[in-house]
Image: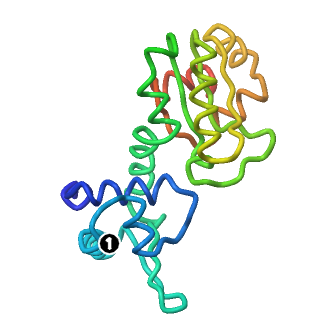
Amino acid sequence: MLEELFISRVRVKILQLFLSSTDALFHVREIVRRVSEEINAVRRELARMEKYGMASSEWRANRRLYRFKKDYIYYKELLSLVAKTTGLGGNLIKNKQKLGKVRFAFISTKFLKGKLSATDDVDMLVVGNIVLPELQAIISDEQAKRETEINYSFMDEAEFRFRVKRRDPFILRVLIQPKVMLIGDEDELLEGVMV
């Protein structure tokens, strides 16, 4: 099964585009421009992705548009992989050493799917002894790219554990939302919550 996922560099770039963009549909020329690959290679990969059930296409005004199928069996896993290698998640992981001692970090799947966040939603939570200016620089950079505000929260591990133990409504709401773990183990993160 993995052979159909990671057969080529072009497919990896197309997967990153589909799974990290808020745009739902892409024309072939738009894909070519954004992934910087030859049009024939892109068409070949899109045809393979359709064959394996990863992508679908539709015609609109004499243009064939492509999208990644959210009901694809490995959609969630691929979304997680892309979240850890591109954008906010990729930058957080790449700069982990500069951020201090990060114990846990996750991004909400709602954010990853490009859905609008409510004012009380948390797109990202970081727990540990954080070098705040470094974290803020990563967030600011991503906000500039996305041209939207990112709702994030950070706290040290003692505060996090205290709030979990106290059953703080904010923390419980943030922890039960669907998420992709960037740093740390989700079972350890939820320790003490599901008691």
What sort of colour scheme is used for the picture? rainbow
The residue at the point 70 percent across, 46 percent down is: 148
The residue at the point 78 percent across, 46 percent down is: 118
User: Which element is circle 1 on?
Assistant: helix
- The quarter of the rendered structure image containing the N terminus is bottom left
Q: Position of residue 85 (x, y in %)?
A: 40, 39
Task: Look at the picture and state if 120 lies above or below 2.
Answer: above
* Three-letter code, disc 1: Leu
Task: Look at the picture and state if 130 lies above or below 188.
Answer: above
Task: Look at the picture and state if 150 lies above or below 38.
Answer: above
Work out whether residue 90 or residue 142 is closer to the camera in this orientation and state it: 142
Determine whether, in the image, residue 146 is placed left or right of residue 7: right
- Judging by the rendered image, the residue that carries numbered circle 1 is 46
Q: Position of residue 137 (x, y in %)?
A: 60, 25
Work out whether residue 29 or residue 49 is closer to the camera in this orientation and state it: 29
Q: Position of residue 117 (x, y in %)?
A: 72, 47
The residue at the point 45 percent across, 52 percent down is: 76
Determine whether, in the image, residue 131 is placed left or right of residue 54: right
Q: Position of residue 93 (x, y in %)?
A: 44, 28
Question: Toward which corner of the image does residue 178 lie, by quadrant?
Answer: top right
- The quarter of the rendered structure image containing the C terminus is top right
The residue at the point 80 percent across, 39 percent down is: 120
Determine whether, in the image, residue 126 is placed left or right of residue 44: right
